Image: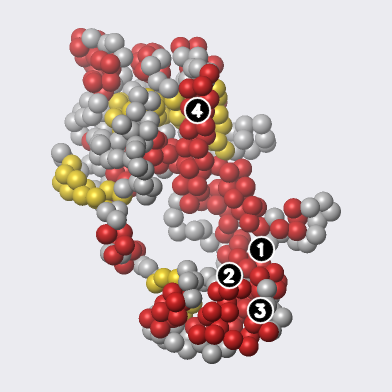
């Protein structure tokens, strides 16, 4: 029994935010129906890939889904989607609301056929603000939420983006949380609702939750910016032969580490004595740590820090992360044979559940792989499905876009 068994999610998302979120729902057992245009989700084309339309990023964000091709600009495509929506619990899209309204697929339209639908729109900006109609993507959201400027403020040469789709991932988790909360309400009351998950506000909340600091008060008690996070020396510490990642925070940890390296008297220094003092003098503390870590090799430091019960570990590269012994031991990487793409490595859901564990039941679908199956479930006959295909309203795997 999966946690979301029996929950059907109609997924009209592409790129990363939405697909990542709906994959999490699929891992928890939801029946996720991925609705794609004839050309497929754009991410299908990002290689390398063993077969057309099945690139690695697509594979890692679209498992546990069924794919149907529908041309929603045709009335018959819209009608088919509404038939699917009538039997769904959740409707997720990341098309701008005005475009959804032009397609006749606004919340008002979809809730007409299914009043209990949980309709979730992933948008760039809240729709009651001046940026409502602007397009959005990960790099823009990182920039507008001040993340690149934090690198520069912390001593970097220039602003830069975090080298992963952090805004999409962070917002995707927010979307999952919204869906789960709305489903609890629906199961209690039978009521559906419309939800808007804006990337900009979601990222701003995360950044300012750390950095509002003195500006949390009116009048402000100081400028925004968390000094420890903004220290130019807050980075992996270079050792004699590599790097160590660690953060010594409590007084107990500091005393233990300093005793083990023969510098216990430093706790008498007012700058080191308390957490607040170390925060106020974080630039000086980090500079001292930077110099101190260079005096021993990585193995020595890991032994000292571990004995003091301080969080610590090696600085991984992508290659060494893939080969990490802990990830291997917990079965993080799973290998499954895909019917068309050979052995596919998937990343299991990180959480451990005792009763309803997430699972990988389906690998990422080929474009239109389940078109006929899903249309039949919606009540279409074989002849009607053939007619929709002939009118180019739908297509099956092998005849659709990038999976041909």
Identify the residue under disc 4: 184
Q: From where the camera sits, is residue 244 visible?
A: no
Of the pair 111 and 292, the residue shown nearer to us: 292
| Disc with the residue nearer the chain's start (4 vs 1) | 4
Asked where in the image residue 317 lies, by quadrant, the reply is bottom left
The residue that disc 3 covers is 272
Q: Secondary structure at mark 1?
A: loop
Q: Which of the numbered marks, if any, corresponds to residue 226?
A: 1
Residue name at image x 38 percent, y 16 percent: 87
Q: Quadrant of the C terminus?
A: top left
Residue density around tag 4, few if under 14, some if 14–19, many if 20 or more, within 10 Å: few
**Within 10 Å of the Cα at label 1, are there few (<14), some (14-19), or many (20+) other Cα atoms?**
some
Q: Quadrant of the N terminus?
A: top left
247 relative to 46 in the view: left or right: right
Vertical position of residue 10 compared to residue 242: above or below: above
Q: Are marks 3 and 4 in contact (CB under 8 Å)?
A: no
Taking the spot 51% from the left edge, 21% from the top edge, the residue there is 188
Viewer-proximal residue, 40 or 10?
Answer: 10
In front: 320, or 58? 320
Instruction: Count residues near mark 3 (Cα–Cα under 10 Å), then give few for <14, some for 14-19, many for 20+.
Output: many
Q: Position of residue 162 (x, y in %)?
A: 49, 58
Disc with the residue nearer the chain's start (1 vs 3): 1
Compared to 35, does 335 lie above or below? below
**Which element is circle 2 on?**
loop
Query: Of callouts 3 and 2, which one flags the residue occurring earlier in the amino acid sequence?
Result: 2
Residue reaching furthest right? 219
Q: Kindly state the secondary structure of the residue where label 3 is placed.
A: loop
Nearest to the observer: residue 323 or residue 343: 323
User: Residue at label 2?
Assistant: 249
């Amino acid at each position: 029994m999966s946690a979301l068994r029996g929950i059907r999610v109609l997924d009209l998302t592409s790129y990363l935010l939405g697909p990542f979120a709906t994959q999490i729902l699929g891992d928890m057992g939801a029946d996720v129906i991925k609705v794609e245009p004839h050309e497929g989700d754009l991410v299908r084309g990002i290689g390398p890939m063993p077969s057309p339309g099945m690139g690695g990023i697509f594979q890692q964000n679209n498992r546990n889904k069924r794919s149907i091709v529908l041309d929603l600009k045709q009335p018959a495509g819209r009608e088919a989607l509404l038939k699917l929506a009538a039997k769904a619990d959740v409707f997720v899209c990341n098309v701008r609301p005005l475009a959804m309204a032009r397609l006749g697929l606004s919340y008002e339209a979809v809730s007409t056929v299914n009043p209990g639908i949980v309709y979730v729109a992933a948008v760039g900006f809240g729709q009651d603000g001046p940026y409502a109609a602007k397009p959005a993507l990960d790099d823009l959201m990182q920039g507008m939420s001040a993340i690149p400027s934090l690198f520069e403020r912390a001593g970097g040469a220039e602003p830069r983006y975090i080298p992963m789709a952090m805004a999409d991932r962070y917002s995707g988790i927010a979307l999952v949380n919204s869906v789960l909360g709305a489903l609890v309400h629906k199961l209690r009351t039978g009521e559906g609702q419309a939800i808007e998950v804006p990337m900009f506000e979601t990222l701003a909340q995360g950044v300012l939750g750390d950095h509002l600091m003195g500006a949390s008060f009116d009048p402000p008690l100081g400028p925004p910016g968390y000094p420890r996070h903004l220290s130019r020396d807050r980075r992996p510490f270079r050792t004699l032969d590599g790097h160590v990642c660690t953060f010594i925070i409590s007084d107990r940890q500091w005393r233990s580490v300093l005793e083990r390296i023969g510098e216990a008297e430093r706790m008498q220094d007012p700058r080191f004595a308390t957490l607040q003092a170390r925060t106020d003098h974080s630039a000086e503390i980090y500079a001292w740590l930077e110099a101190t870590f260079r005096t021993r090799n990585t193995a020595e430091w890991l032994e000292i820090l571990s004995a003091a019960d301080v969080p610590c570990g090696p600085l991984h590269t992508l290659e060494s992360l893939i080969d990490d012994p802990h990830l291997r031991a917990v079965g993080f990487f799973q290998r499954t044979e895909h019917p068309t793409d050979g052995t596919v490595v998937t990343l299991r859901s990180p959480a451990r559940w005792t009763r309803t564990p997430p699972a990988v039941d389906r690998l990422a679908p080929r474009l239109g792989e389940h078109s006929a199956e899903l249309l039949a479930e919606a009540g279409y006959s074989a002849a009607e499905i053939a007619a929709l295909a002939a009118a180019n309203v739908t297509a099956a795997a092998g005849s659709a876009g990038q999976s041909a």
